[in-house]
Image: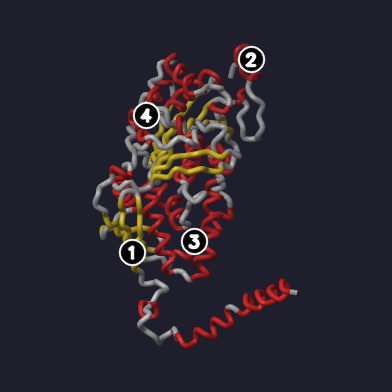
C-alpha cells in the first residue's frame, strides 16, 4: 500500500482522539462493513466514508420485518453510491425465535411501556455485521447511531464481544452535520433521499415487533401527538365501532395459534399486528430513561407486542403460584433492563432465560382478548395447567382442598405479629 498523501495525513491528524480500544484508527481503515438501511443517514455515510477514510465499503442490510421495504432498490442505491459489495439478510425467523420469543417469556417491557423492539434487534444486526465483516475481509464496522442514543451501546458492545479483532466507526458522532446539512450533502453528491426527507421530519425505526418515532414536536413535552406520526396504527378514534375478539393459543409460553389457526411465529406476529393496527391498539407515548443519561420522549406503535404480551402475562399468572408470579416479576424487570442496556451477551441474561424457560413449560392454554378503539381487555382464560378450581372459587361450594371452617384459625395466625406490633405502639403512644 502507498504512503498517505498530505491530504490524508491532515485528515488522519484531525480525526477525534479515540477513547475506546475498539475505535478505528483512521490510518488503518481499509475496508468497512456499513450497516446500511438505504435512508438519509446511512446513504450519506456510505459516500462520506469513501471520501474521509479513502476506504472500500461493503453494505449490509438486515430484514427484521420492516414494512414496505424494497431490498432490490436498497442494494441498487448502495452500488450507485459506490459500495463494492451489498448484502441483504432476511433475519425475520431468527429475530422471532431467538430474540422475540425469550422477550415474550419475560413479559419484556422497559419503563413500563417500551417492549424493546429496537433493543432486541440491534444485537442481532451487530452479530450479523461481525459475520459478514469477516466473510468479506472488512477490518472495520460502521453504524449510523448517534452519541445520544442507546443503539450505539448495543451495537458496539456486541462487536467488541463477538469480534474483538474488528474496529468501529460512528460517523454521526463526529461529522457535525444536522439533518439539513445531510440533505445538502446528499444533493451535492447526487444521492437520492429515500422517502423525501425534506417533508419527513421524524426519525423512524421499525421491525416485526414495533415502530418508534423521534424528532420534530415529539421533543416538546407540552405538544400533544400529531396525526401524521401514526403511519402504522389507526388512531383509536377512527378505529371500528365494533369490538373484535382475538383468541391466542400458547404452548410452552410461545404463541402458536391465532383464532384457532396454527401459524409460524413470524406469520402469527404479522397477523396479530394487522388486527391490532386496525383497532388502534399499541400506541405508547413514553418518557424513557436512556442508559447514556438522557431522559427522552418516544412515540411507539407496538400492536403485536401490546396484544401478545398482555395475553402471555395473563396466562402465566393463571398457571403460576403466587410465589412464582411475585418472584418472576422482578426477574422480568431485570431481563428487560439488561436487554435495554445493550447487555444481550451478559451471562446473567442467559441465566435468567433458563428460569424463564422452566417456568414457561406450564404456560400452555388460550386467552381471549377484546380489542376496541385502542384498548386490549382479557375476557376468557383456559389452561390445563391453571392453578384454579371453579369449585373452590365458588361461594356456593365447600369441601375438597378448601375448608371454610379453617379460616378463623388462619386469620388469627396470619395477623398475629401485626396485631401485637399495633398494640405495642398504641400503648407506647398513650404512655
Mark linked to residue 10: 2
Are there few (<14), some (14-19), or many (20+) residues within 10 Å of tag 3? many
Q: Residue at x 45, y 85 (%)?
A: 404
The residue that mark 3 highlights is 356
Question: Does dot 4 land on a helix, a strand or a loop?
Answer: helix
Q: Position of residue 161 (x, y in %)?
A: 58, 43
Contact, mark 2 vs mark 1 (Cβ under 8 Å): no
Q: Nearer the viewer, residue 28 or 18?
A: 18
- Judged by depth in the image, the label closer to the viewer, 3 or 4, is 3
10 versus 35 height, above or below:
above
Disc 2 from disc 4: Cα separation: 33 Å
Q: Count residues near mark 4 (Cα–Cα under 10 Å), then give few for <14, some for 14-19, many for 20+.
A: many
**How far apart are the alpha carbons under marks 3 and 4?**
39 Å
Q: Which residue is mark 1?
A: 366
Label 3 close to label 4 by CB (< 8 Å)? no
> How would you rate the neighbour count of disc 1 (Cα within 10 Å): few for under 14, some for 14-19, many for 20 or more?
many
Q: 60 left or right of 53?
A: left
* Image vertical order of residue 384 relative to residue 14, above or below: below
Name the residue nearer the viewer: 59 or 263.
263
Residue 379: image quadrant is bottom left
Amino acid at each position: 500500500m502507498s504512503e498517505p498523501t498530505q491530504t490524508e495525513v491532515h485528515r488522519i491528524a484531525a480525526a477525534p482522539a479515540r477513547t475506546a480500544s475498539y475505535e478505528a484508527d483512521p490510518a488503518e481503515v481499509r475496508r468497512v462493513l456499513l450497516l446500511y438501511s438505504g435512508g438519509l443517514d446511512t446513504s450519506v455515510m456510505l459516500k462520506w466514508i469513501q471520501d474521509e477514510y479513502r476506504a472500500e465499503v461493503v453494505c449490509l442490510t438486515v430484514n427484521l420485518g420492516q414494512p414496505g421495504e424494497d431490498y432490490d432498490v436498497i442494494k441498487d442505491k448502495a452500488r450507485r453510491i459506490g459500495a463494492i459489495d451489498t448484502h441483504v439478510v432476511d433475519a425475520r425467523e431468527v429475530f422471532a425465535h431467538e430474540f422475540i420469543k425469550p422477550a415474550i417469556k419475560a413479559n419484556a417491557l422497559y419503563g413500563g411501556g417500551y417492549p424493546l423492539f429496537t433493543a432486541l434487534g440491534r444485537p442481532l444486526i451487530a452479530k450479523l455485521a461481525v459475520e459478514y465483516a469477516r466473510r468479506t475481509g472488512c477490518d472495520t464496522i460502521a453504524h449510523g447511531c448517534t452519541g445520544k442514543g442507546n443503539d450505539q451501546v448495543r451495537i458496539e458492545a456486541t462487536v467488541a464481544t463477538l469480534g474483538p479483532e474488528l474496529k468501529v466507526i460512528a460517523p454521526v458522532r463526529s461529522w457535525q452535520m444536522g439533518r439539513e446539512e445531510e440533505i445538502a450533502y446528499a444533493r451535492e453528491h447526487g444521492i437520492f433521499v429515500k422517502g423525501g426527507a425534506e417533508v419527513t421530519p421524524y426519525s423512524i425505526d421499525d421491525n416485526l415487533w414495533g415502530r418508534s418515532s423521534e424528532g420534530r414536536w415529539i421533543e416538546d413535552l407540552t405538544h400533544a401527538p400529531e396525526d401524521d406520526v401514526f403511519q402504522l396504527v389507526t388512531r383509536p378514534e377512527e378505529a371500528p365501532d365494533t369490538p373484535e375478539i382475538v383468541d391466542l393459543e400458547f404452548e410452552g409460553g410461545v404463541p402458536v395459534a391465532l383464532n384457532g389457526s396454527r401459524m409460524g411465529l413470524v406469520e402469527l406476529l404479522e397477523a396479530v399486528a394487522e388486527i391490532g393496527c386496525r383497532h388502534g391498539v399499541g400506541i405508547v407515548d413514553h418518557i424513557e430513561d436512556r442508559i447514556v443519561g438522557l431522559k427522552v420522549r418516544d412515540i411507539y406503535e407496538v400492536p403485536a407486542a401490546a396484544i401478545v404480551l398482555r395475553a402471555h402475562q395473563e396466562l402465566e399468572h393463571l398457571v403460576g403460584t403466587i410465589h412464582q408470579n411475585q418472584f418472576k416479576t422482578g426477574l422480568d424487570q431485570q431481563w428487560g433492563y439488561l436487554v435495554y442496556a445493550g447487555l444481550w451477551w451478559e451471562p446473567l441474561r442467559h441465566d435468567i432465560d433458563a428460569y424463564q424457560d422452566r417456568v414457561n413449560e406450564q404456560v400452555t392454554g388460550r386467552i381471549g382478548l377484546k380489542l376496541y378503539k385502542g384498548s386490549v381487555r382479557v375476557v376468557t382464560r383456559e389452561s390445563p395447567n391453571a392453578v384454579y378450581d371453579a369449585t373452590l372459587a365458588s361461594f356456593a361450594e365447600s369441601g375438597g382442598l378448601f375448608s371454610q371452617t379453617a379460616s378463623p384459625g388462619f386469620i388469627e395466625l396470619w395477623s398475629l405479629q401485626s396485631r401485637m406490633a399495633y398494640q405495642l405502639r398504641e400503648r407506647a403512644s398513650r404512655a
